[in-house]
Image (tube, helix red, strand yellow):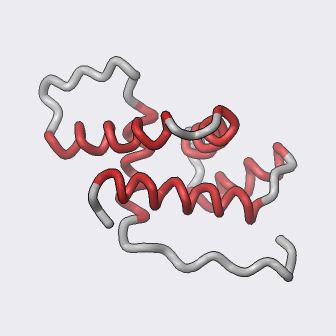
């Protein structure tokens, strides 16, 4: 990361919860059977789906690739950026924007 680029702010209170929501969304098929699911799980899944639907294919694929790894998020981003020659700062900026949009869609902020 270049020294001239500003650091992104520290983690927001909703970060871990939204990360969980994204991982839950990615582990469930699009034809999610809502029977027996808690209302919160359904609301979480729909919030993530709404935001993901409005992303570009490239951004959506980047997020899917990062979150489908078994790594912790920081390591997953680092690995993705190294393997795909992507800018780490821009990747974190995208993730921050998406997390915020999901939190807003879910009513967390």
Q: Position of residue 6 (x, y in %)?
A: 73, 80
Left or right placement of residue 93 versus residue 17 in this view? right
* Callout count: 0
Whether residue 29 sits left or right of residue 11 in the image: it is left
| Left or right: 26 as drawn, with respect to 3 | left
Q: Position of residue 79 (x, y in %)?
A: 74, 51
**In the picture, residue 36 is in which quadrant?**
top left
Residue in the picture at 24% in, 42% down: 43
- The quarter of the rendered structure image containing the C terminus is bottom left
Based on the displayed image, in which of its 4 quarters is residue 45 positioned? top left
66 is higher (above) or lower (below) than 28: below
Q: Is residue 96 above or below residue 10?
A: above
Q: Which of these two is toward me, 23 or 6?
A: 6
Q: Quadrant of the N terminus?
A: bottom right
Q: Residue 51 lies in what quarter of the image?
A: top left
Q: Point out residue 18 in the picture as x, y percentages from the top left corner.
A: 39, 55
């Amino acid at each position: 990361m270049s020294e001239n680029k500003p650091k992104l702010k520290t983690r927001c209170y909703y970060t871990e919860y939204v990360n969980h929501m994204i991982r839950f969304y990615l582990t469930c098929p699009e034809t999610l059977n809502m029977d027996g699911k808690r209302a919160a799980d359904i609301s979480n899944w729909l919030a993530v789906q709404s935001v993901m639907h409005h992303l570009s294919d490239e951004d959506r694929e980047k997020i899917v690739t990062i979150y489908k790894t078994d790594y912790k998020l920081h390591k997953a981003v680092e690995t993705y950026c190294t393997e795909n020659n992507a800018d780490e700062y821009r990747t974190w900026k995208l993730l921050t924007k998406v997390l915020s949009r999901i939190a807003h869609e879910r009513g967390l902020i």
